[in-house]
Image: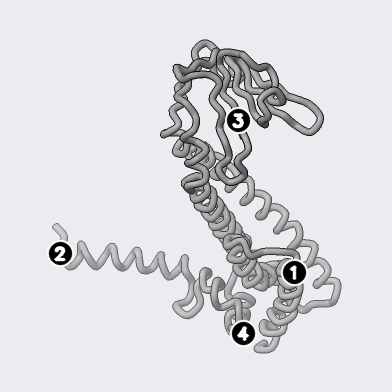
Amino acid sequence: FCTVQELIAKPLYYFGTWGICLMGSWRYRPLSGLWASFCDPGFYQHVRESWRGIGYLYFLFLCLLSSVTLSVAAYFSFSAKIGSPEFSAIIFQLPRLTLKNGVLASAADQPVAVVDPQTKQIWLVVDTADRFSSPDQVGSRFLLNSKSLKLKTKDEVKSVEYVNFAKNAEIDPARIPDQIKGLFGLFVAVMTVVLFAMDSIFGLLKACLVAGIIKLCRSQHSYKTILRLIFVCWTPNMIVATALSASGQENLVTQVVGAVVAVVYLFLGFKWARSQQ
């Protein structure tokens, strides 16, 4: 039987050993790049000497962090709009609706006009009795008939049959905000994966192109070293750009400044890595 000390000491020893192997030296760990890449020349020297491969796992982590941050920010921003008093004032004008075998019905008196409280214009009309056949007749953009939704565009009126999407459903205005948030959350989850895949693939291709150009300029570093230094040099710009985009402050000026900063950090990063050789 093992003593209490052995039961505690052995797991700590093995986990500690693996932790050091995975995280690197005590001063510079792989995730240290999130802050050390901004102004620490010693970190760039550490990347050049101690890191192996091209640093793609580190870049994948940056892409994942950026994608998740942007997606979470988009979800909370959208949820705030859905939960706003303005949106609630529109939604709760809707009557309770029932879709059965592709036919929409409501016990409320028909038609029901949903008015935008800010513009005072009719936004949608519910007419399950089919008294009207076009949004133009009621002066709205949307018209809900018994079998289809009619949408007014600039050039024409489009009609969408309910049966193409669902045959049976209960539409309760009180549950609409939560249902919309759920659907948008699903959409955000899918878009997070898509955004992560695009960033990681195109980022690698761009890094390979930049590394090729740097290698043609007779850099003393190996191609793998150049690639991992590029990923670290891109860290400050990626973090700042993600923060600006998530807060809704990103525009053309910040994008141009970000591109310039990325180039400056490429110059500084390779200079810092070379200065201590």
Task: Give the Cα separation between the discs numbered 3 and 4.
Answer: 61 Å
| 79 versus 14 height, above or below | above
Which of marks 2 and 3 precedes in the sequence?
A: 2
Task: Give the Cα separation between the discs numbered 2 and 1.
Answer: 62 Å
For badge 3, the amino acid type reads Leu
Task: Give the Cα separation between the discs numbered 1 and 3.
Answer: 39 Å
SS at badge 3: strand
Circle 3 sits on which residue? 124
Mark 1 and mark 4 residues within 8 Å of each other at the beta carbon: no
Looking at the image, is mark 1 or mark 3 nearer the viewer? 3
User: What residue sits 67% from the left and 64% below the top?
Assistant: 250
Circle 2 sits on which residue? 4
Circle 4 sits on which residue? 41
Quarter-of-image position of residue 172? top left
Which of marks 4 and 1 precedes in the sequence?
A: 4
Quarter the N terminus occupies: bottom left
Rendered location of residue 132, percent (x, y): 65, 17
Looking at the image, is mark 2 or mark 4 nearer the viewer? 4
Mark 2 and mark 1 residues within 8 Å of each other at the beta carbon: no
Rendered location of residue 82, percent (x, y): 50, 44
The reply, left or right, for residue 110 in relation to residue 59 is: left
For badge 1, the amino acid type reads Val
Task: Give the Cα separation between the discs numbered 2 and 4.
Answer: 45 Å
User: What residue sits 45% from the left and 31% below the top?
Assistant: 173
For badge 4, the amino acid type reads Pro
The reply, left or right, for residue 114 in relation to residue 208 is: left
SS at badge 4: helix
